Amino acid sequence: MTEQADLNTGKEWSKSDLFSLRNRIEHGRTVCHIATFLRRTEAEVREKAAELGLNLPLAATGE
């Protein structure tokens, strides 16, 4: 079975998505982990985090 990693790409962010994004950032998850969990691209995760004023941990940005 092929996994569709970016199934939600381009879709509106639900309240649940936003909660999960904030929660995973707070717990220091990587952008890759967050994107996979939310089934979005890493770029979308970074853009939404920036839009919401959320600071990705250094480890989560790959720096």
Image: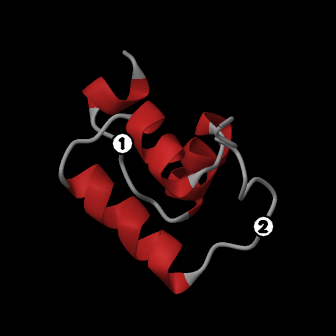
Number of other residues with Cα within 10 Å of mark 1, as a class: few under 14, some 14 to 19, many 20 or more: many
Give left or right: position of 25 versus 43.
Answer: left
Q: Nearer the viewer, residue 14 or 39?
A: 39
Whole-percent x, y for residue 10 in the image: 81, 58
Give the residue type at disc 2.
Lys
What's the residue at 40%, 57% (across, down)? 54
Earlier sequence position, callout 1 versus callout 2: 2
Question: Where does label 2 land, which residue?
Answer: 11
Using the image, tell me which numbered label, if any, was put on residue 56: 1
Using the image, tell me which numbered label, if any, was put on residue 25: none
What's the residue at 29%, 55% (across, down)? 24
What's the residue at 43%, 46% (across, down)? 34
Whole-percent x, y for residue 15 in the image: 51, 84
Give left or right: position of 45 versus 62.
Answer: right
Number of other residues with Cα within 10 Å of mark 2, as a class: few under 14, some 14 to 19, many 20 or more: few
Q: Nearer the viewer, residue 42 or 7?
A: 7
The quarter of the image holding the C terminus is top left
